[in-house]
Image (cartoon, helix red, strand yellow):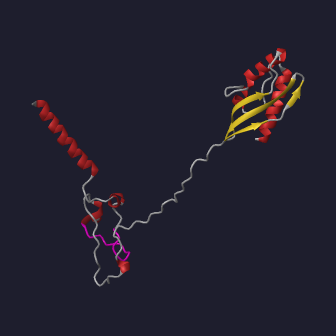
């Protein structure tokens, strides 16, 4: 029984708090935003004199709405039928720009001949960023094949030195100076094309 009473009391208190915090019906946002000292605008574009004690306008009181009042002798013309809470607003122009589409493209460098054979480098770019590099046509057999494997392991792939440094300024692979130099030359030419 106590729990039910506490639950009902809590629900009533929270509902009351929501109503109070939200504001009373009929209070417009324009009336809430207006400073107290600002006089309401009446039809015809002039400010109404203070009609309430203390200079408080009806729109400054919570729950009050501003009603247009006609001046004595004023004619009713279409221009006189303006809203009494006219506010000048200057909205910034809305521009909708979507993000540029990133294009993925592949660029292949020239074939570079060197002491142990020839090779060329193919890079994959996403926008202007290198995301992959591969050596093509590298020697596969013997001592040259081992050097090619070392160069390929260090430079190529999505986690290789080419992707990490985003340039052809790579460190030379120890024991594979000629292969490293040829790889860098073809890579630099591919970067120049891209």
Relative to 24, say whether 114 is above or below: above
Choose between 58 and 30: the one closer to the eye: 30
What secondary structure is the magenta-colored segment mainly? loop
Q: Residue 40's image quarter?
A: bottom left
Tell me the quarter of the image containing the N terminus.
Answer: top left
Q: Residue 102's image quarter?
A: top right
Choose between 30 and 46: the one closer to the eye: 30
**Residue 46 painted magenta:** yes
Q: Position of residue 18 (x, y in %)?
A: 25, 46
Is residue 67 at least partly visible in the picture? yes
Relative to 145, say whether 87 is above or below: below
For the image, the number of numbered tags is 0
Q: Residue 147's image quarter?
A: top right
Residue, x 78% and y 37% (percent of image)? 190
Q: Position of residue 114 (x, y in %)?
A: 89, 26
The range drawn in magenta is 40-52
Residue, x 82% and y 17% (percent of image)? 141
Tell me the quarter of the image containing the C terminus.
Answer: top right
Relative to 174, say whether 66 is above or below: below
**Residue 21 painted magenta:** no
């Amino acid at each position: 029984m106590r729990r039910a009473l506490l639950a009902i009391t809590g629900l009533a208190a929270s509902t009351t708090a929501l109503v109070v915090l939200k504001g009373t019906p009929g209070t417009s946002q324009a009336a809430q935003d207006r400073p107290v000292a600002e006089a309401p605008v009446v039809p015809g574009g002039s400010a109404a004199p203070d009609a309430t004690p203390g200079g408080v306008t009806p729109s400054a009181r919570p729950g009050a709405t501003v009603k247009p009042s006609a001046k004595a002798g004023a004619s009713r013309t279409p221009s006189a039928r303006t809203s009494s809470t006219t506010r000048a607003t200057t909205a910034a122009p809305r521009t909708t720009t979507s993000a540029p589409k990133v294009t993925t493209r592949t660029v292949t460098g020239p074939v570079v001949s060197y002491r142990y054979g020839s090779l060329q480098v193919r890079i994959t770019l996403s926008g202007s960023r290198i995301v992959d590099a591969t050596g093509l046509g590298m020697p596969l057999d013997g001592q040259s094949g081992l050097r090619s494997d070392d160069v390929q392991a260090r430079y190529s792939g999505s986690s290789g030195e080419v992707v990490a440094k985003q340039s052809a300024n790579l460190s030379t692979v120890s024991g594979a100076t000629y292969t490293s130099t040829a790889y860098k030359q073809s890579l630099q030419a591919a970067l120049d094309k891209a």
